Image (cartoon, rainbow, N blue to C red):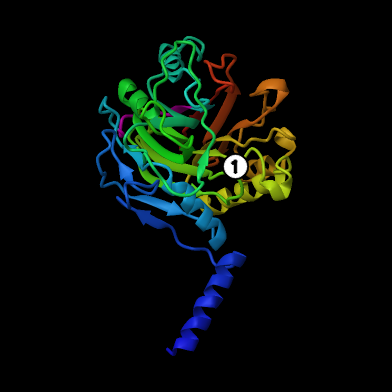
Amino acid sequence: MSRFAGLVSTLLLASLLNSGCVKTPPIVAANAGLASCRGIVDGTGQPSSVAIRWHQPTDVRERRSLDAWCRAAGPQVVIAAPATGDDASSMRDDLVVIDWNAHVGGGDLNGLIDALRRGDITGGEPVQHFVVLLQEVFRAGASVPARFTGAGFADRIEEHPATGERRDIVATAEALGLALYYAPSMRNGAGAYDGIAEDRGNAILSTMPLSDFSTIELPFERQRRVGITATVNGVDATGTPWQLRVGSAHLDATGGAKRLRLFAEGLRARQAKNLIDTLGSEIPTVLGSDLNTWWAGPAEPAYRQLRQFFSQTDPSPPRTTLRAGRILDYLFYRLPPTWRGESRRLDDRFGSDHFPLIGRVHVTHH
């Protein structure tokens, strides 16, 4: 190929990528630079051999912005198996799922899970097996770069639960003996505070082993946002194996300057469509989300798109999940015809500014 022909091919490909006509395949990230959010470590901060599928928008300019924010955050964390050594093949016909925005340390995650295990929030029924889908959790310590270049960070949020103990997501998972998948969306503040840097993002906690990890970088405008997914497996009472993909997503609250900050409905709709296009429909899926639909709640296009795609979502009208009657948080279900998903809002915020949602997936093969 001549130099001119090669240049033409390169320019044509860049044009197609920017137009969105070409869907790029996922990148498989494995220990890809521990000093950025594409690295992967275990609960002790050591490099992990786990592979994660990494999905990015096709727009080259958006990817440059996402990369700048990525460099300011630390690596992803995977603790694939719970400390209890739970057997993935043990028989169960349902799974409890919680979705919650934990307010960057303000939410008492330990208290919520203790209440779940005791049965305080399930009508007196203690819950043994569950998955918690989280937004706005934080990770602190040496895994987060002490220094970075560029402007890819968010203003620091430092909330404390009523107990007074602010514990990061990795320490929480280890204390509770749960499997963990954590992917930072952004650095939490420009510097290190008391010598400790932080990032914040989404997480999945589980009493069951996690596998098949994916990170979905959403279209960028104001802040870097990601969705994450993992898979849990079980066997129902008939001995039939089942598989469920679980995910957590957090959309932008406001737009950039070109949208006058407030008008971000179109951006959230674009981020929701990106999630739908990336997830596909082959695997039963539960998605916990803070859609930031503060402007119009379930009337926003982002909710309507996801509700249509996740067609087995509980039809009950969503309840207020934030102050002033706003509805931001949702549990979505896309399940086989014989399965059923249900959800409701809890009445205790457990220290966060958001109410948790609790759901249950009923697995049947007959």
The stretch drawn in magenta includes residue 72 = no
Residue 366 in sight from this viewpoint: no
Question: In this orientation, which residue lies closer to the viewer: 91 or 137?
Answer: 137
Viewer-proximal residue among 365 and 278: 278
Q: Is residue 344 above or below residue 42?
A: above
Amino acid bearing label 1: Phe
Q: Quadrant of residue 174?
A: top left
Percent x, y of residue 37:
40, 46
On screen, residue 83 versus residue 25, left or right, reads left
Residue 138, percent from left and from top: 44, 30
Question: Residue 356: x percent and y percent?
Answer: 55, 23
Does residue 199 appear in the picture of this structure?
yes
Q: Name the residue located 51 percent from the left edge and 14 percent from the top edge.
A: 121
Label 1 SS:
loop
| Number of marks in the rendered image | 1
213 shown above or below 316:
below
Where residue 32 appears, as percent x and y from the top left, is 32, 53
Within 10 angstroms of label 1, few (less than 14), some, or many (20 or more) residues? many
Q: Magenta-highlighted stretch: main secondary structure?
A: loop
Q: Which residue is mark 1?
A: 310
In the picture, the quarter occupied by the N terminus is bottom left
Q: Which residues are magenta?
A: 88-97
Which residue is located at x 42 percent, y 52 percent?
Answer: 54
Q: Is residue 219 left or right of residue 137?
A: right
Write the residue at 54% across / 71% down.
14
